[in-house]
Image (tube, grey):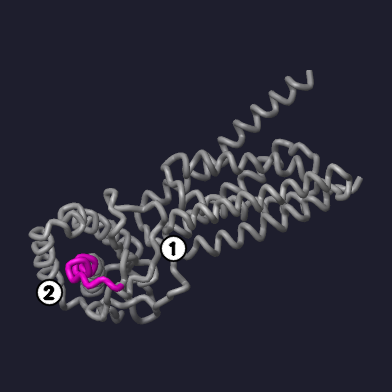
């Protein structure tokens, strides 16, 4: 079979590419469609979850729970760090709620994709039956 | 003019992505390309797209195309509307008004072995005015008083550091900075709120008078360098 095998190296590479793509999409969304919680929580969470589909198509492998958790944690952390750099470093936004915002972003960026992962898992099982 | 440009850019973007997907589907349909081949192309596309987008959108935070070094507060009188070189985000407006300005200022606190520097900066490539060639003293004045508010808080930081040194107390720089930056943000909001972004001329003059006096009372702390004994 001529397809990228599922390995840790492939996973790390995929996380790096998807992380870059996530940041780029969020930058576009921020410029043209900034709408509070939709921008900060829902769009990044859905994009982080979409990593599962990207990896599935790329390697034909449905990621196991712990590997998926590691991947979304890395993506969520990366995304939040970019927010932190942009808000504090570039925009001089010293409001101390920034740290709370980052914590919420990391948490929701992990929890929402996990819920979606759970739903997908049950749908997958139901379809197989 | 910006509307049609954005429309054309989005249109071409959608066309290019559609053609790209169609090409991949066609190649895959005729078994001319493997999954590895497809994803090699997709990955390259994602990386190139992301890098271009990130670099381009960075310009709305720091306009590197018209870069000018941050200006120290002591040179505030040299600042002109021409120095407001930043870009405005496409959808940003001020109460529905697209013609406005914003200023970006910051306080930098740095600790060296024998001194502490507390500097106030105006960032030209992060500040924006809708027309740089505008002759509008009132607008410039309003924006410069934002800069003075930042400097006032920087002087309060310097004052507290001086007092700590005099009383031989430990200097908690982070804590001090945090407290006065919070105060600065509150003052900036209050200033914009009360003057309605300079539209209420009388209140604007009151604020100017108030800030001038406050700066004068802290004139002893205008030196950005504090020597540690």
Q: Secondary structure at mark 2?
A: helix
Coordinates of residue B203 in the picture (x, y in percent): 10, 58
Q: Quadrant of residue B46?
A: bottom right
Q: Quadrant of residue A120?
A: top right
Which part of the image, by quadrant, shows the N terminus of chain B? bottom left
Coordinates of residue B132 in the picture (x, y in percent): 31, 71
Counting residues from the start of the chain, the first of labels 1 and 2 encountered is 1
Left or right: residue B186 compared with residue A114:
left
Residue placed most toward the observer, B193 or B9: B9
Is B135 in the magenta?
yes
The magenta stretch is B133-145
The rendered magenta stretch, by its main secondary structure, is classed as: helix
Q: Secondary structure at mark 1?
A: loop
Residue density around tag 2, few if under 14, some if 14–19, many if 20 or more, within 10 Å: few
Residue ID at (28%, 56%): B182
Q: In the rendered image, which residue does mark 1 sit on?
A: B61
Q: Residue furthest top?
A: A129
Q: How many marks?
A: 2
Residue placed most toward the observer, A67 or A58: A58
Coordinates of residue B109 in the picture (x, y in percent): 35, 71
Residue placed most toward the observer, B182 or B124: B124
Q: Chain of mark 1?
A: B
- As drawn, A123 above or below B197: above
Alpha-carbon span between mark 1 and mark 2: 33 Å
Q: Chain of mark 2?
A: B
Coordinates of residue B187 in the picture (x, y in percent): 21, 57
Which part of the image, by quadrant, shows the C terminus of chain B? bottom left
Q: Which mark is residue B216?
A: 2
Residue ID at (53%, 63%): B56
Left or right: residue B62 compared with residue A122:
left
């Amino acid at each position: 079979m001529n397809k990228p095998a599922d390995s840790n190296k492939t996973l790390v590479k995929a996380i790096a590419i998807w992380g870059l793509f996530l940041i780029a999409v969020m930058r576009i969304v921020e410029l043209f469609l900034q709408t509070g919680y939709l921008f900060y929580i829902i769009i990044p969470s859905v994009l982080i979850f979409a990593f599962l589909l990207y990896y599935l198509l790329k390697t034909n492998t449905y990621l196991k729970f712990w590997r998926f958790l590691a991947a979304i944690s890395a993506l969520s952390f990366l995304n939040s760090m970019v927010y932190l750099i942009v808000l504090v470093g570039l925009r001089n936004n010293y409001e101390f709620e920034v740290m709370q915002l980052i914590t919420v972003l990391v948490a929701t960026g992990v929890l929402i994709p996990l819920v979606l992962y759970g739903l997908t898992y049950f749908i997958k099982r139901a379809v197989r039956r | 003019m910006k509307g049609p440009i954005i429309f054309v850019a989005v249109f071409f973007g959608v066309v290019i992505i559609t053609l790209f997907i169609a090409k991949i589907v066609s190649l895959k349909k005729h078994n001319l390309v493997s999954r590895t081949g497809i994803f090699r192309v997709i990955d390259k596309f994602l990386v190139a797209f992301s890098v271009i987008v990130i670099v381009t959108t960075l310009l709305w935070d720091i306009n590197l195309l018209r870069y000018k070094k941050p200006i120290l507060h002591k040179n505030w009188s040299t600042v002109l509307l021409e120095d407001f070189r930043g870009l405005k985000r496409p959808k940003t407006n001020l109460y529905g008004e697209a013609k406005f300005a914003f200023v970006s200022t910051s306080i930098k606190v740095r600790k060296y072995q024998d001194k502490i520097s507390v500097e106030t900066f105006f960032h030209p490539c992060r500040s924006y005015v809708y027309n740089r060639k505008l002759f509008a003293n009132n607008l410039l004045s309003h924006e410069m008083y934002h800069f003075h508010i930042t400097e006032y808080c920087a002087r309060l930081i310097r004052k507290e550091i001086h007092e700590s040194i005099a009383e031989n107390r430990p200097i908690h720089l982070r804590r001090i900075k945090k407290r006065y930056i919070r105060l600065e943000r509150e003052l900036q909001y209050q200033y914009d709120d009360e003057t309605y972004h300079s539209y209420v001329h009388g209140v604007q003059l009151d604020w100017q008078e108030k800030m001038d006096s406050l700066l004068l009372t802290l004139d002893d702390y205008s030196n950005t360098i504090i020597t540690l004994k």
